[in-house]
Every structure is written in structure tokens, then in C-alpha cells.
Amino acid sequence: MRGDIPSKKKVPFPIPNQLWGYLRQYDRQTQLPLQYQDLVRYSTSLPLIDQNGVDTLWETVYYTESEREELHRSLTQIYALLKTDGDLTVLAHLSVARVDFCTFGNTQPFRVRIINRLNDNYDHFYVKRTDASRVFGLELEEILSPNHVSYLVDGSTLIEEHIAGIPGDDFMRRNLEDNTFNLIRIAKEFVKFNERCFVRLLGDMRSYNYVIDITPDIEGSQFRMRAIDFDQQSYEGRKSFYLPQYFKDNNPIIFLGIEHMNDQTVRQYQMEERSLIAMRAKSSRARLRLVLDLMSSTPLSAPEKVIRLRQELAQHHKNDDFLSCENMGSIVRTNIQLVLQKDFRQSINTL
């Protein structure tokens, strides 16, 4: 089976009581004025077409007059909770411009566009069903990546902030015609992104599941790839599923690396990223250990996937420690420890 095809549709996993305690401890859990199911009761919908006349696979949904006012008020309150820690004074200038529903993929999220009436500036956030896999994916992103993520959970509902950037597939179609200096930087960032995904076993990073954030620099631009889909956190059984380099729709960037980097340079960038991840792991040691403990006691995949992944990683690392792992959480812990200990002295045995 190719590395770019999921074995079957991802199923959500419930959040256990211990994880709810963690979410309260780190201010991720809060009481929301509505739940995901409240948004499902729309009366009609229309396909959302982009500026080029292409179907986006999202639908703009509409509610009855009797429900719309209350729903929009609740959605602006949620935005205030997410962005201003619940300061409701901002609500006077905010309104809901549009609610979209995604019919593609596993999560079927709602995307809410919030507009500031004072300056017509807009922002988005997402309303999704709760899933333990996604929560652990978001937490590992917060702890081990250079990125901050904001989200809230209540009952059956998870609220995620919008992560700004150009979707990877759009970027490869429209933004790869650049100067050589920037192309090298793009290839370098992909190596680092590939490493971040593999260390923490975040899967399914096809080009539409991450965005590229571009920051103008003194000469050229800086690029950062950011995951926007965390459903496939340590779920699949194939090692290749956790390496973005094996997804064929990432080939345009992979070919840049082949053209502009040799094996020694790739190795250097891998080691740089592992060192940064190790430093983040050390600085958040207690929190990371707690997350990994919770992952190890939470069902996150099917037994046959656990068996396959531990066997493939044992072969990859030439280390039999994986063979004693009985769940995805313990596999992630072992992978973090072994990957970060390779070829340089970073002690993280206390994870």
C-alpha cells in the first residue's frame, strides 16, 4: 500500500476523564455557549465557489431567522473566548459574516468568518467535534513545534483558531517560481517540517493539510510550514504515513530539495531541527511527560495498527524497544526519545 493513502477512514476517539483534567489545568476547557450539533441544524446551503469559479468543497450554510440571531451571538462570544480571554467588550464591533461547512474529509468542521465592522477586517475560527487524537496532536504541536496554537474544548465541541498561511497545494501551484535563494529556503523548511512530523508521529501531511507562512526578510523571505490538521496524530500503522516526503503531492517541493541540497546539507538541517525539538522538550519536560502519560492510557488506534507501526519503527531505528510498546502513546514516547538521542547528546530519558 502506498504511503500517501490512509488505510481506512479515521474514527474519532472519546476524551477520557484524565484528559479532561489536563485540559482544565492548562485552560483549554471552558463552557461554550453552543455545541457542534447546534450548527448542524441549518436550513439550507449553497456551494462555496472561489474567485476562480472552482468549487472549494465547502458549503455556506443558512439558518432560520429564529435561530440565526442567537447562533451568531453565541459564535461572537466564542471568538471573544478564543481571542480575548472572554472580554465581551469587543462584541459591540464584531459580527458573523458567514458560516461554512466542509463536506470533505473526516472532521466535517464548520468555519466561522468574524468581521470587525469598524474596519471590515475579518478572521476565522473552526467548530469541530471533539477527538482525543486531535487534542493530543494540538498539544504536541504546542510543546514541540515553534508554533503556538489556541483551542478550546467543551463536551462534544472543539474550537480551533485559524492558522494563517497559504495552503501547501496552492503554494506549489502559484508561488514556486521564485529566486534561487528563496527556493533553497523552501526546500530547507520542508526538511525541517518533515522532521517535526516524524519525531512526534503526526501523519497525513499531504499538501492541503499544512500551510506555508511567508515572512519578508532583509534579503528574500523566510518560510515556515505549519500543520493545520491534527486528526492523524499517531493513528496509522505505516511509518511512511508520518513522513511528508512520501506524499506524491509534495513532490514539487521535494524536487527542489533534490536540485538544491546534497545529503550532507539535508543531514545538517535534520540535526538542527532535532536539536531545537530536544530543547523544547527539555523546557516543557513536565508538561510533555504528562501528555505522553495520558496518550499511553488512551485508546488512539486499532491494535493491528499499533503492532505494524512498532515493528516498522523498530526496523527503522534498529532498536527493539518499540516491540514492547502496547499503545500509540508509548510508541510516540519511544520515538521521541530515540530520534532525539541520535548522533548528539540530548538526554531526555525522563520523558
Image (cartoon, helix red, strand yellow):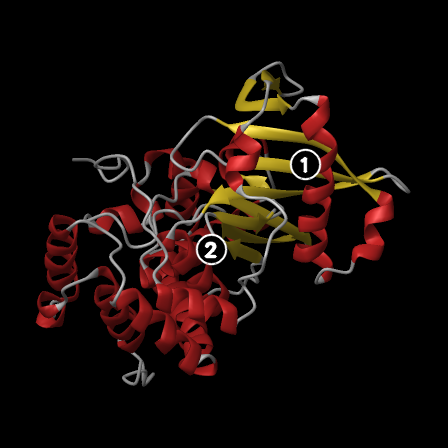
Residue 210 pos. (x, y %): 48, 44
- The residue under label 2 is 188
Q: Which mark is residue 60?
A: none
Q: Quadrant of the N terminus?
A: top left
Q: Amino acid at mark 2?
A: Lys
- The disc, 1 or 2, on the residue closer to the chain's N-terminal end is 1
Figure check: 282 above or below 1: below
Residue 40 pos. (x, y %): 52, 30
- The residue under label 1 is 71
Residue 150 pos. (x, y %): 58, 58
User: Between tags 1 and 2, which lies in front?
Assistant: 1
Image-based side of 222 in relation to 333, left or right: right
Figure check: 36 above or below 237: above
Residue 217 can be seen in this image: no
Q: Residue furthest right?
A: 118
Total marks placed: 2
Question: Mark 2, residues whose alpha carbon is within 10 Å: few (<14), some, or many (≥20)?
Answer: many
Figure check: 182 above or below 329: above
Q: Quadrant of the C terminus?
A: bottom left
| 109 or 18: nearer the viewer | 18
Q: CA distance from mark 1 to mark 2?
A: 44 Å
Q: Could you say whether the residue bearing mark 2 is in a helix, strand or loop?
A: helix
Residue drawn at 71 percent across, 36 percent down: 70
| 113 or 169: nearer the viewer | 113
